[in-house]
Image: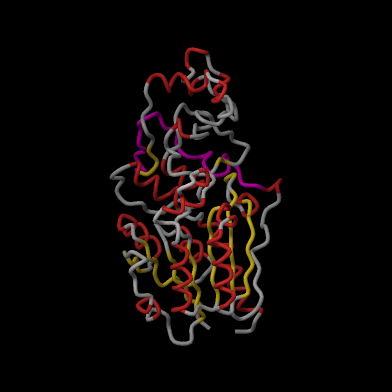
């Protein structure tokens, strides 16, 4: 039978891309960020629905599924309200994104998928809203499994932990088992080691997405004194920002840091192209990561088309907010195997 999926909060299609690589037909993605439309549709051959999920009629999505197909619903609700940074904010429940996963439940009620999957930050598991989410899914007849996964265990070259949830109406389903052992982790060298070198502010002539932000003279001096996996402690004192001259700043050792070739990268945030936003310095070139390097470390295919780079900030946001396609692929394979094992 035909397996068909719909991707909620799809962004530029990281999860969709991975599912398609696992040979699952993704019919459409829904997101309220219209700027993701070109990249999503160009690379995935699926319909981008630009809509506010809080106001969308999910009966329109249900019409997209073929008759008698095996229905899959996946998604990654915006995770900022549940991040460790936001968790320090006592007013986080006033965030308008706080209840977005409730709309995932509503979509499940209307679409009645056979299998569901959700990816999110690990902090969501400590919230009342997540407990309610699980209870509602179980009331709807789903067998649920979820766990915090460490991305390098799945072939993703980032020190990144995420929640993966799987649910099924046709039998017990489990979160995918790791595909890589520690001695087989993908490294920064494996992923970006062969890309053409760039200077600050430069754009590769053959790939406009392989482009680098400029650095001021002070930050150039800083990165020239930075060592792979080192910190600001490697610098001359006159290069230190004021915050690092205080005791309270001494724990932030990764900011302004270089990555190392032989390790996985840090988590690709929406600020990975900014040298001062984390350990986003290139292992040996005196610059921050290019947009293409960030995309590759996110496991997007080499030819993923991000369109014209109108703003590095916007494209980096698209890339950093995405579910790593490799994680989508592993989830997709698990879904296919689940259908096969349950003889549907």
Q: Quadrant of residue 270?
A: top left
Q: Residue at left 51%, top 57%?
A: 325
Q: How many marks?
A: 0
Q: Quadrant of residue 125?
A: bottom right
> Where is residue 211 shown, x and y percent of the image?
37, 38
Q: Nearer the viewer, residue 160 or 203?
A: 160
Asked if residue 172 is positioned above or below residue 227 in the image, the reply reads: below
Q: Residue at left 62%, top 49%?
A: 152
Q: Nearer the viewer, residue 160 or 292?
A: 160
> Where is residue 313 shown, x and y percent of the image?
35, 42
Membership of 196 in magenta stretch: yes
Q: How is the image coloured?
A: secondary structure
Magenta-colored segment: predominant secondary structure: loop
Specify whether 194 is left or right of 172.
Answer: left
> Where is residue 252 shown, x and y percent of the image?
55, 29
Asked if residue 21 is positioned above or below residue 64 in the image, the reply reads: above
Q: What is the magenta range?
A: 185-208
- Specify the farthest residue to the bottom: 68
Q: Residue at left 43%, top 68%?
A: 103
Membership of 200 in magenta stretch: yes
Q: Quadrant of residue 283?
A: top right
Asked if residue 339 is positioned above or below residue 267 in the image, the reply reads: below
> Where is residue 225 shown, x and y percent of the image?
52, 19
Q: Nearer the viewer, residue 163 or 82?
A: 82
Q: Quadrant of the C terminus?
A: bottom right
Asked if residue 242 is positioned above or below residue 117 in the image, the reply reads: above
């Amino acid at each position: 039978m035909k397996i068909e999926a719909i991707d909620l909060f799809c962004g530029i299609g990281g999860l969709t891309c991975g599912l398609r690589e696992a040979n699952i037909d993704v019919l459409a993605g829904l997101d309220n960020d219209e700027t993701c439309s070109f990249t999503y549709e160009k690379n995935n051959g699926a319909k981008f629905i630009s809509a506010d999920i809080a106001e969308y009629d999910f009966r329109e999505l249900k019409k997209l599924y073929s008759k008698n197909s095996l229905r899959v619903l996946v998604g990654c609700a915006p995770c900022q309200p549940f991040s460790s940074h936001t968790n320090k904010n006592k007013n986080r429940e006033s965030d308008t994104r706080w209840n977005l996963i409730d709309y995932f439940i509503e979509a499940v009620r209307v679409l009645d998928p056979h299998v569901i999957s959700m990816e999110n930050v690990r902090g969501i598991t400590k919230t009342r809203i997540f407990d309610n989410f699980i209870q509602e899914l179980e009331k709807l007849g789903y067998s649920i499994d979820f766990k915090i996964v460490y991305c390098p265990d799945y072939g993703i070259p980032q020190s990144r932990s995420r929640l993966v949830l799987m649910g099924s109406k046709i039998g017990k389903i489990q979160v995918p088992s790791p595909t890589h052992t520690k001695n087989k982790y993908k490294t920064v060298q494996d992923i970006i080691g062969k890309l053409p070198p760039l200077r600050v502010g430069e754009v590769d002539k053959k790939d406009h997405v392989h482009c680098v932000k400029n650095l001021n003279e002070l930050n150039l001096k800083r990165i020239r004194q930075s060592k792979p996996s080192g910190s600001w402690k490697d610098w001359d004192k006159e290069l230190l920002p004021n915050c690092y001259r205080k005791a309270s700043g001494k724990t932030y050792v990764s900011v302004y840091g270089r990555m190392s070739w032989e390790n996985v990268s840090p988590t690709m945030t929406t600020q990975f192209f900014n040298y001062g936003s984390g350990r986003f310095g290139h292992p040996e070139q005196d610059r921050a990561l290019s947009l293409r390097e960030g995309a590759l470390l996110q496991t997007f295919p080499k030819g993923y088309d991000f369109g014209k780079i109108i703003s590095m900030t916007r494209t980096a946001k698209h890339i950093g907010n995405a579910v790593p396609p490799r994680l989508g692929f592993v989830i997709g394979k698990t879904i296919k195997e689940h259908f096969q094992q349950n003889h549907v």
